[in-house]
Image: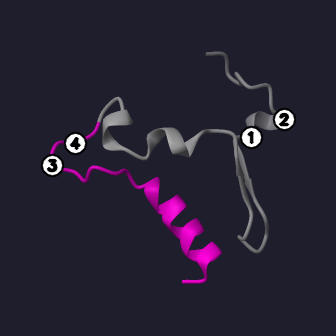
Amino acid sequence: YPGNPNGSACGLAGLCSEDGRVTIMMPHPERVVLRSQLSFAPTGTSSVTPWMGLFDNAWRFVTGH
């Protein structure tokens, strides 16, 4: 890939609001929530990746838990 394959200004891939309540990402974390979706994962690790935490936290925030 070239140095900046998506053509974004300064090669940005994500932004977060100052208060941390809004995160905008160019990558697709939903495509790597399962260990089987990774090109490499150490043996003996969980079936989900740390990216699942992003969705768990969003769910907790939306449902008020």
Dot 2 lies on which element?
Answer: helix
Question: Going from the N terminus, do you reach mark 2 or mark 3 first?
Answer: 2
Can you identify the residue that label 3 sits on?
Answer: 44
Q: Which residues are magenta?
A: 41-65
| Quarter of the figure that contains the N terminus | top right
**Can you name the residue that lies furthest to the bottom here?**
65
Q: What label sits on residue 42 in the rendered view?
A: 4
Q: CA distance from mark 3 to mark 1?
A: 34 Å
Q: Mark 2 is on which residue type?
A: Ala
Q: Is residue 13 above or below residue 19?
A: above
Q: Mark 1 is on which residue type?
A: Leu
Q: What label sits on residue 9 in the rendered view?
A: 2
Q: CA distance from mark 4 to mark 2?
A: 34 Å
Q: Pointer 4 and pointer 2: residues touching (CB < 8 Å)? A: no
Is 28 positioned to the left or the right of 41 in the image? right
Q: Mark 3 is on which residue type?
A: Gly
Dot 1 lies on which element?
Answer: loop
Q: What label sits on residue 12 in the rendered view?
A: 1
Question: Going from the N terminus, do you reach mark 4 or mark 2 first?
Answer: 2
**x 61%, y 83%: residue:** 64
Dot 3 lies on which element?
Answer: loop
Q: Position of residue 24 (x, y in %)?
A: 73, 52
Q: Pointer 3 and pointer 1: residues touching (CB < 8 Å)? A: no
**x 56%, y 68%: residue:** 59
Q: Position of residue 49 (x, y in %)?
A: 37, 50
Q: CA distance from mark 4 to mark 3?
A: 6 Å
**Front one among 24 and 9:** 24
